[in-house]
Amino acid sequence: MSLTAQDIDRIANLARLELAPEEGQRMLDQINGFFTIVDAMRAVDTTGVQPLPHPIATIQEVALRLRADVASEPNQREANQQSAPAVERGLFLVPKVIE
């Protein structure tokens, strides 16, 4: 996958950025360079390779310290929402920000 100058212009417009032509070209080169690296990594055959739980696992055994996923704090939603200016059915109400 590679981008074109028009793609960079569109992305810059969506991000509300003004890029000079040389900046746009530099950005295009950098992003396409990144895609080249990603394509090279995708080309590697990893069939039968187990994912590593930790990078150190390639050189030594790693015992992961995992804990049970259990809620340890009580539900204090009402107490936390007492200082909110507007709450409805347990949710914070905020002003609309989408144009």
Image: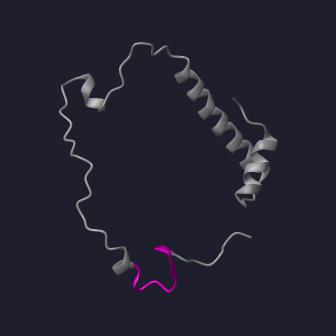
For the stretch drawn in magenta, the main secondary structure is loop
Q: Is residue 94 above or below residue 57?
A: below
Count of marks overlaid on the render: 0
Q: Is residue 37 above or below residue 75?
A: above
Residue at the spot 22% in from the left edge and 46% down from the top edge: 68
Taking the image as shown, residue 76 lies to the left or right of residue 2, namely: left
- The quadrant of the picture occupied by the N terminus is top right
Residue at the spot 27% in from the left edge and 23% down from the top edge: 58
Q: Percent position (x, y) of residue 51?
A: 36, 25
Residue at the spot 55% in from the left edge and 22% down from the top edge: 42
Residue 60, quarter of the rendered image: top left
Q: In this view, does 99 lie above or below 62?
A: below
Say whether residue 19 is visible. Answer: no
Residue lying furthest front in this view?
Answer: 89
77, 84: nearer the viewer: 77
Taking the image as shown, residue 90 lies to the left or right of residue 62, namely: right
11 part of magenta stretch: no
80, 20: nearer the viewer: 80
- The quadrant of the picture occupied by the C terminus is bottom right
Say whether residue 33 is visible. Answer: yes
Q: In this view, does 63 lie above or below 26?
A: above
Residue 55, quarter of the rendered image: top left
| Render colour scheme | one colour
Residue at the spot 72% in from the left edge and 49% down from the top edge: 23
Which region of the structure is painted magenta? 81-91
Q: Percent position (x, y) of residue 38?
A: 56, 28
Q: Percent position (x, y) of residue 67?
A: 21, 45
